[in-house]
Amino acid sequence: MSERRMYVAVFIIIGLSVVLIIAAYAVRYMTVFNIDTISVQGMTNVPQSVSILLASCYGINRFTLDEKNIERQIESNPRIKECVIRYTEFNNMEVTLVQSDEKCMLFDGNSYYLISDGNRPVLLEKSDCDALAGELCVVEVSSRFIDYLRSFSVPPSFRQILELISEVSLENSSLISHIKYDNNTGDGFGQIVLSLDSLYSELYVREQVSKNRISDSIRVIQESTAEDPAGRIRFMPQHWDLYSDALVRRTVE
C-alpha cells in the first residue's frame, strides 16, 4: 500500500469514528428513543417496588439507561430470580421476570421475610407484602428463629418443612386459617401448628409425617366436628396432636 493510500485509509477510519461518536451522542437526545411503553412478562403479580422502579424509566432515553444496573436492582428483590431487559422497536422496553421458587414467606409478628438465593431470610418491602400474602403461604415464626436463620442460614430440614407446609396449605386452603411453626432454633423437626377456625380446632404436628398424613388428619377433624354439632354451638376448642403413629384429641378448657 502506498503512503498516500495509507493516509486516506487513516483519514476514513478517523472520519467514521467521529461520525459514530457524534451519532451515539446524538441519539441520546432524540425523543423517538424515549421509553414510551414498558411490558412485563413472566409474573402475574409484579412486586410494587419493581413496578415503581420500572415506572421511573418512562420518558427516559433508552440510550441513557443502564439496563444492567436496573436488572441488578430488580434481581435484588427476593421475589425475583432473574430479570432480562431488551427493547422492541424504538421506544418499547420489554422486561422478562423469572420469579423465585419460594412458596412460603415467614412472618415474625411484625415483618415478612422471604428466603433468598443466599439461603437466608430477606426482609420484604411493606409495599410487596399484601400481594404476596395472597399468593404465598404465610408461616408465623418467632423473631428469635428469624435471627437464627439469618446467622446460620436455612438448614435443609427447614426447607423440607416449608415444602411440606406449602403442600398441605394448597390442599386444605379452605380450612387452614393460620399456620405457625415453632422451633427451639435447633435442626430438629419442632412442631407445626395449623389453626382450623371453621372447625374450632388446632392441629399440632409434632413429628415428621407426610403431607397425606396431615391431610387425612384434617379430614378426621372435619368429620368429628360434623358429628358433634353441640360442640360447635358451644364453640368448644379442640386441641389435636399428630404423631407419626397417632392422632390424639384433647379438649381445651
Image (cartoon, grey):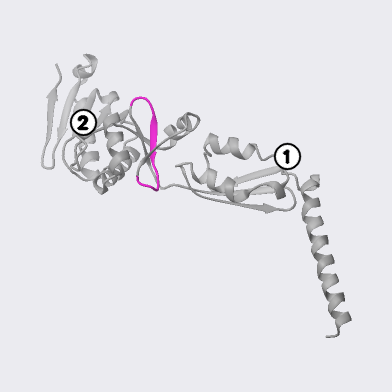
Name the residue at the front extreme. 3
Instruction: State which quarter of the image contains the C terminus.
Output: top left
Instruction: Give percent across and percent down for residue 26.
Output: 81, 51
Instruction: Give percent across and percent down for residue 68.
Output: 59, 51
Mark 2: which amino acid? Leu
Q: Which mark is residue 59?
A: 1
**Which residue is nearer to you in this view: 109 or 243?**
109
Q: Which residue is mark 2?
A: 203
Instruction: State which quarter of the image contains the N terminus.
Output: bottom right
Is the residue marked by circle 2 packed among few (<14), some (14-19), or many (20+) residues within 10 Å? Answer: many
Above-or-below relation of 185 to 65: above
Range drawn in magenta: 109-119
Mark 1: which amino acid? Gly
Above-or-below relation of 220 to 65: above
**Which residue is nearer to you in this view: 105 or 213?**
105
Whether tag 2 and tag 1 are in contact, CB under 8 A, the answer is: no
